[in-house]
Amino acid sequence: MVKELNVRTIVAALVCAPLVAGICLGAAPAKKTATTRPARPKLACRLANYGPYQEGALAHLQSIGVKYVFMNIPKPEEVKAIRQRLKDHGLKALVVRGDVDWTKPSAPEDLVPQLETCKKMGVKYMFLSVKGDWPDERKQVIYERLRKAGDAAAKYGVTLTIETHPQLGTNADVHLATMKGVNHPNVRVNFDTGNITYYNKDRDALGELKKIIDYVATIEIKDHNEEFETWNFPALGTGKVKIPEIVQVLKDHGYTGPITIEIEGVKGVKRDEPTIKKEIADSVVYLRRLLKGS
């Protein structure tokens, strides 16, 4: 009887060991491997959306749960106070608008103090409007200046993004030519969904985005009535830009950069402060709903 018991015990142990060794030996259960949450785009609001009512912009953005802003680059002496104001309202600058004269040979060097401001504010993206009317040979000079600016930006961990403006970013084809001409990893595209149909005929934002998406580092979601050179940029979801499809392209591409809401209003239509705040709040709700799950 004793021998039979010993045999059974041994057999049970042998069977148990390879199957549930951890339980039989009293081992601690294996720890679950932590999963890294995928990065998501950060939603910002451009302070210029508030027009003449920017004084109340930060408090309003805080009240509707926005955490990031797109703002003009502050002067060095203003940085400390602006950082504190943003902090007091639970906000951070996500993108700043740089400002230099690209017709000047000193443009790359002139940008350096602004890049230093980016570092102080923890900003990784600088929007640039490089407008001009240059012949093709002159473009090569601007490309070289942007390349040098890219070298400077890299030292500060900043990506420069070229706005959808003539002459270097009029549409996706022009953006692409600029990207290839500059050929620098720290110089990329700011894609403005409303400017495509403002500056171009027979093009639409969705189609243009698909062509240039690999170079897009920042994007402004702006609606438009899609009439050439017509100043009609209403609240998001009330114009004709295919914003849901654009957001889907961003999701499909795994885009994780800044997404800025921009509302520039309609020419001839006056808006008071409550109207502007409502349009911004409604646009935030609209875009958040589209981004949900991204």
Image (cartoon, rainbow, N blue to C red):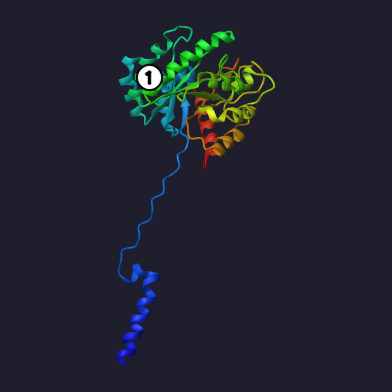
Secondary structure under the numbered disc 1 in the rendered image: helix
Task: Tell which of 119 and 247 is nearer to you.
Answer: 119
At horizontal 37% and vertical 79% (from top left) the residue drawn is 12
Asked whether the viewer can see residue 184, the reply is: yes
At horizontal 61% and vertical 35% (from top left) the residue drawn is 245
Asked whether the viewer can see residue 290, the reply is: no
Task: Tell which of 218 and 55 is nearer to you.
Answer: 218
**Residue 217 location (% of width, % of height):** 49, 28
Task: Tell which of 116 and 264 is nearer to you.
Answer: 116
At horizontal 53% and vertical 18% (from top left) the residue drawn is 181
Q: Which residue is mark 1?
A: 115
- Farthest residue toward the right? 202
At horizontal 42% and vertical 13% (from top left) the residue drawn is 108
**Residue 103 location (% of width, % of height):** 48, 7
Question: Picture quarter containing residue 118?
Answer: top left
Vertical arrangement, residue 134 with respect to residue 201, above or below: above
